[in-house]
Amino acid sequence: MRNDLERFKQEREFDIFDLTEGVWRQRWLVLVVTAVVVAVFAIYAIAVTPVYQAKLNVQPPLDSDINQLNVGRSDGKGLLVPITAKFVNDVYLRNLQSNVLRQMFYKRVYLTSFVENVEGESQAGLYAKFNSQFLVGIHQSEQYATVTVLAEDPKQAADWAVRYAEMAGEQSKKELIERVVSDFKVEADNLQQSIDSARAKARLERDDRIAQLTEALKISKSIGLEKPPIIENNLSSEVSAGMNGSLMYMRGSKALESEIQNLQTRSSDDPFVNNLREREEQAAVYRSLKVSPDQFSVYRQDGVVEIPETPIKPRKALLVAVGMFAGLFLGIFIALVREAWRFRQARLRT
């Protein structure tokens, strides 16, 4: 009966209790493996270069920030509709997200920040790394944006965030100034065109007047009328009204000759053009208006960008914890494999 019991023990399957007992017997192996893995993770956490994160929030400008853009646009006519803070903010957010700005910052700031020689580096790889370090988030509901920068130097991360927002502002200011100058130029050109048209019209009207007076002079001379005739009171008003029309010859040849000579020798028709001086003044004002980028703002920085003190990666505590669990799992796995191998060898010997 005892032999049967021994045979049963040898032939039975390897169960959970055997596994637990085997792991316990090899507990020192599990502890050593766990310690080694934790040490590897800890060394990595210490050796890897830390990465810091800086954030900058930018808000839309106030109406008072863009007053200079609306100088000369208060009438709101034609192209000179007042520029709103929302429009300026839309321009800024578009530039903040543009690839043009990214490439400009990459060439002017990012590449020049490397002390070591980067000629051997892949340009595509460098640009991909740069893109992963710069994130722009747009919050449409509140109309503001967040610039997030990752860098190995905490001060550099903060400086880059501020500089990136500033470069977007510079591009936006340039675009807005070009628009304002273009609007003023178009408006001034339109006014100049109306002035030229008014002068041409006045010249044609003067030529027409000379032609009418010349024809009336011929009639007046043909009938020998040098001076206006004396007219009875009851007809004087009717005749006087007709002297600028079909009865113009009744003014007499002397008066007609005098007016013709005056019209022919007139040097300019400007004094006789309605609102000419006003339009000239407006055109001159539009041509003289200048907008300096220092006179307005396209965004507001929300607070000061603080230099980060704690890196976002590597997370040393998390790495050590992961290393502990990984080491424990690996140690138990090795112990189980060894125990299963020992059990199999024991069965083969029987």
Image (spheres, helix red, strand yellow):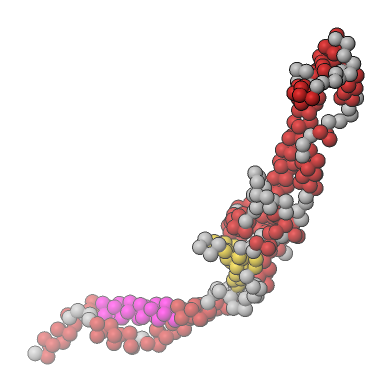
Q: Magenta residues: mostly which secondary structure?
A: helix
**Which residue occupies 82% across, 21% down?**
231
Q: Residue furthest bottom?
A: 2
**Which residue occupies 72% across, 38% down?**
190
| Along the line of sight, the residue nearer the viewer: 8 or 271 | 271
Quarter assignment of residue 275? top right
Quarter assignment of residue 28? bottom left
| Along the line of sight, the residue nearer the viewer: 346 or 260 | 260
- In what quadrant of the picture does the C terminus appear? bottom left
Please state the extent of the stretch shown in magenta in the rendering. 324-345
Q: Residue 133 at what x, y percent from top left?
A: 59, 63
- In what quadrant of the picture does the N terminus appear? bottom left
Residue 168 vs residue 295: left or right?
left
Q: Residue 274 at what x, y percent from top left?
A: 77, 36
**Residue 120 shows in the view:** no
**Residue 302 shows in the view:** yes
Residue 131 vs residue 285: left or right?
left
| Along the line of sight, the residue nearer the viewer: 18 or 303 | 303
Residue 50 vs residue 217: left or right?
left
Q: Residue furthest left?
A: 1
Check residue 9 for magenta coloring: no
Q: Residue 181 at what x, y percent from top left?
A: 73, 47
Check residue 330 for magenta coloring: yes
